[in-house]
Amino acid sequence: MEKVIEVRHLSKSFGANEVLTDIDFAVHKGEVVCIIGASGSGKSTLLRCINLLEKPSGGRIIYRGEDILDDKHDVHQYRQKLGMVFQQFNLFNNHNALSNCTVGQIKLLKRSRAEAEEVAMHYLRVVGMEQYTSAMPRQLSGGQKQRVAIARALSMEPDVMLFDEPTSALDPETVGEVLKVMKELAESGLTMLVVTHEMGFAKEVAHRVVFMDKGVIAEEGVPEQIFNNPLQERTREFLKRILNA
């Protein structure tokens, strides 16, 4: 299988506080990797290091064979290959749904407005938001905002989609609509790296699950092994706590 992203011996410190220690894993083309773990285990920081919103303190991030932490590498070009979906949607509040999905295409990919709108409409249809093209973010529910945010990321036609707890800010009744879209994207063969506390989603959709604890990868494996037969005591404790909550 073709490796898209490799993380090698990655570390990240904020002052004296080491948040990530010696992180090693890879994401292959077409694979869905879910990262699970308690709050403060370093999951979101890892995602932010991968797309260089945070600068790693050490180690390497290799994208399609090239070390993107190398000074020669064009960070902006690399970031365009990664779609990012945040907990808090991060939509442009002064743009409607359609414009949210075209502005990056026009500015960064230099697409014409007509082409950008055609691509945006395609992805708004994919996430079931085509009837809300002229709605402003304030007029949308949390689940609708997150689906527009997913369409916006997809409109850049990225190589990999990164999701940082995409359902954590949503009401329970809108969580399902976002997970349904993500499941359909996974089934379409999109390469996805998902930080999530939705264990049902990880169990059903992930090809591999990475369990993080206190800034290290404590265990990784196929969902069946991680959920039904974890090797590490701390994995067992975490799952017991979260599944019985």
Image: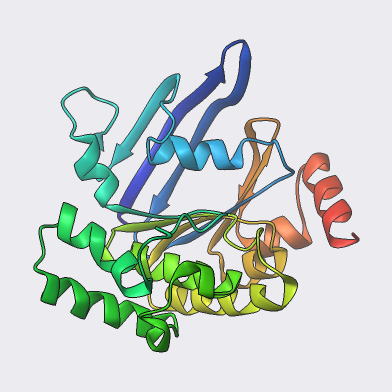
Question: Which residue is depicted at the point 70% across and 56% down?
Answer: 226
Decide if residue 17 is on the left or right side of residue 145.
Answer: right
Can residue 65 be seen by looking at this rendering?
Answer: no
Return the residue nearer the eye: 131 or 161.
131
Q: Position of residue 48 (x, y in %)?
A: 47, 39
Return the residue nearer the eye: 27 or 127.
127
Quarter holding the N terminus is: bottom left
Question: Which residue is depicted at the point 57% across and 60% down?
Answer: 166
- Number of disc labels: 0
Q: Position of residue 156 (x, y in %)?
A: 26, 62
* Furthest-right residue in this view: 244
Q: Quadrant of residue 172?
A: bottom right
Q: Position of residue 174 (x, y in %)?
A: 65, 76
Q: Is residue 241 above or below residue 198?
A: above
Question: Which residue is depicted at the point 63% across and 56% down?
Answer: 196
Return the residue nearer the eye: 115 or 93.
93
